Amino acid sequence: MAMPADTNAAGDIFGGWVLSQMDLAGGIAAGERASGRVVTISVDTMKFIRPVHVGDVLCVYCDIGAIGRSSMKIKIEAWARRHRFGHREKVTEAMFTFVAVDDDGRPRPVPGVN
Ligand SMILES: CC(C)(COP(=O)(O)OP(=O)(O)OC[C@H]1O[C@@H](n2cnc3c(N)ncnc32)[C@H](O)[C@@H]1OP(=O)(O)O)[C@@H](O)C(=O)NCCC(=O)NCCS
């Protein structure tokens, strides 16, 4: 839930807070797919469509797309449920790329990819 501590001076939620929630969600999805540690390598075409307000519940959805040797492209959408129980509106979307890494932080193959 977006809280007062996450706002800018105008009272809107910081884009960086939204981005971090999306990064967390994408990291969970990528980590599941890669069965282990992953890191974010890039965030492309991020668009902030609508503002997020205090009291909105941020819902984040991940769709795993192309998988390379070690990389995974994940389309991530954030939707705000207005005032906790209200209607849902898409507020942000972006394409993230995560890389599966080993214990030393070096790229490793994503399991199950030829
Ligand atoms: C992720 C990391 C280990 C990759 O190291 P690297 O030496 O660039 O590795 P490689 O060149 O072998 O690339 C690894 C994969 O990333 C992909 N990649 C590289 N640069 C990319 C970019 N700008 N955007 C998308 N994918 C990219 C490569 O195509 C490759 O994919 P593939 O294995 O599926 O073919 C290294 O860049 C890193 O540690 N970055 C910091 C990650 C981090 O700390 N994230 C949090 C930021 S606070």
Image (tube, helix red, strand yellow):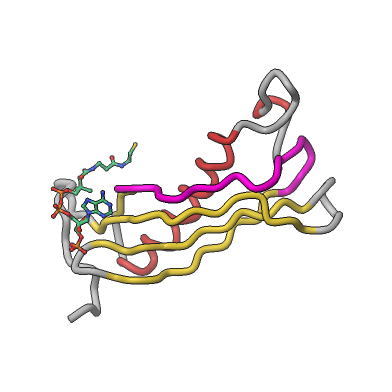
Q: Which residues are magenta?
A: 41-57
Asked if the magenta segment contains residue 56, the reply would be yes
Q: What x and y, as percent, mark residue 111?
A: 24, 73
Which one is in front, 78 or 27? 78
* Res. 11 image quadrant: top right
Q: What x and y, as percent, mark residue 73?
A: 36, 63
* Res. 53 image quadrant: top right
Q: Is residue 112 above or below residue 38?
A: below
Quadrant assignment for the C terminus: bottom left
Asked if the magenta segment contains residue 48, the reply would be yes
* The furthest residue to the top: 9
Left or right of 1? Residue 38 is: left
Q: Is residue 3 above or below residue 62?
A: above
Left or right of 12? Residue 29 is: left
Q: Is residue 113 above or below residue 38?
A: below
Q: What x and y, as percent, mark residue 66?
A: 33, 71
Q: What x and y, as percent, mark residue 88?
A: 77, 58
Left or right of 24? Residue 6 is: right
Number of numbered markers:
0
Left or right of 23? Residue 47 is: right
* Res. 99 image quadrant: bottom left
Q: Residue at x 77, y 53 (%)?
A: 81
Q: Residue at x 61, y 31 (%)?
A: 14
Which one is in front, 73 or 113? 73
